[in-house]
Image: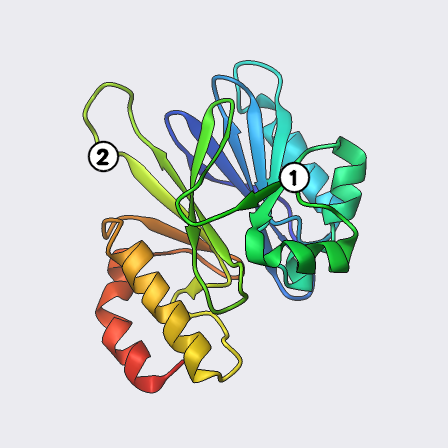
């Protein structure tokens, strides 16, 4: 194991924990619904013992026993799915991924995706709703998952968390293989479907490295388009 799990967001209705795994420093995220105990794990990237540590650390995050309800994959690249088959074998949890990456995930892992996702879908389990945002370019079916949480009934905008996979990082968008068409596609989707849809205080939780906010990155959008990466 390369890092122990950590509580990174303790929200009114959810907790979010992160484990950093593998030599590529992949982020594995676990969302737990405090009221129901349902959990969604985002990117079973590697190191099943580290993922087990997330579940152990989250055991007291809910008022009732916790249970893994869904494994969501942001995209098909091997470094994001290396523990997927082992986790499915261990838990029997259903899986979700972008429709255009389903075949690649099955080829890499042998795991058939239970829920093939499209842009605008909602990935929902008991107490957790993730908006599904298709960001085309890093891979054909790359998805971001967006969680909103706030004080119930107080009219607060609350907190927005964007699990962006490898499509958006501090300082730029994800790798598009030096392909101008893929770059333009990804930047257009990131701009139109994230920056135009969510406020500056939305927190971006990428597939590698540290978090950022849309507000911190927004001024750089013209520079990213001009430089081409």
Query: In this image, 151 relative to 35: left or right?
Result: left
Instruction: Check disc 2 and report the residue beneath it.
Output: 157
Could you tell me how far apart the alpha carbons at marks 2 and 1 are, in whole angstroms?
Answer: 32 Å
Q: Does residue 127 appear anywhere in the picture?
A: yes
Q: In this view, does 45 lie above or below 181?
A: above
The structure residue drawn at horizontal position 49% and vertical position 76%, both measured from the top left corner, is 176
**Residue 200 at x, y percent in the picture:** 23, 53
Q: Residues within 10 Å of mark 1 (few under 14, many from 20)?
A: some
Name the image quarter holding residue 115. top right
Q: Residue furthest left?
A: 155
Q: How crowded is mark 2: few (under 14 residues within 10 Å), some or many (20 or more)?
A: few
The structure residue drawn at horizontal position 67% and vertical position 45%, both measured from the top left corner, is 113
Instruction: Check disc 1 and report the residue beneath it.
Output: 114
- Secondary element under disc 2, as helix, strand or loop, is loop
**Residue 59 at x, y percent in the picture:** 62, 25
Query: In this image, 169 relative to 108: left or right?
Result: left
The earlier-in-sequence mark between 2 and 1 is 1
Query: In this image, 202 relative to 104: left or right?
Result: left
**Residue 21 at x, y percent in the picture:** 66, 55
Q: Does residue 74 appear anywhere in the picture?
A: no
Query: In this image, 191 relative to 7: left or right?
Result: left
The structure residue drawn at horizontal position 52% and vertical position 18%, both measured from the top left corner, is 36
Of badges 2 and 1, the one in the foreground is 1
């Amino acid at each position: 194991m390369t890092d122990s799990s950590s509580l990174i967001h303790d929200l009114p209705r959810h907790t979010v924990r992160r484990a950093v795994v593998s030599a590529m420093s992949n982020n594995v995220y676990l969302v737990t619904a405090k009221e129901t105990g349902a959990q969604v794990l985002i990117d079973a990237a590697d190191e099943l013992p580290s993922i087990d540590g997330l579940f152990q650390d989250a055991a007291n995050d809910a008022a009732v026993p916790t249970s893994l309800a869904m494994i969501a994959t942001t995209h098909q690249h091997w470094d994001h799915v290396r523990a997927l088959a082992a986790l499915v074998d261990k838990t029997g949890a259903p899986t979700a991924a972008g429709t255009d990456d389903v075949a690649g995930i099955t080829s890499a892992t042998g795991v058939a995706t239970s829920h093939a996702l499209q842009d605008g879908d909602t990935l929902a389990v008991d107490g957790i709703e993730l908006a599904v945002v298709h960001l085309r370019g890093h891979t054909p079916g790359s998805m971001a998952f967006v969680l909103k949480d706030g004080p119930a009934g107080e009219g607060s905008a609350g907190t927005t968390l964007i699990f962006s996979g490898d499509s958006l990082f501090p300082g730029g968008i994800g790798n598009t293989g030096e392909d101008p068409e893929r770059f333009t596609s990804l930047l257009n989707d990131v701009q139109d479907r994230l920056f135009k849809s969510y406020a500056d205080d939305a927190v971006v939780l990428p597939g590698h490295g540290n978090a950022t906010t849309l507000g911190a990155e927004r001024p750089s959008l013209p520079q990213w388009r001009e430089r081409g990466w």
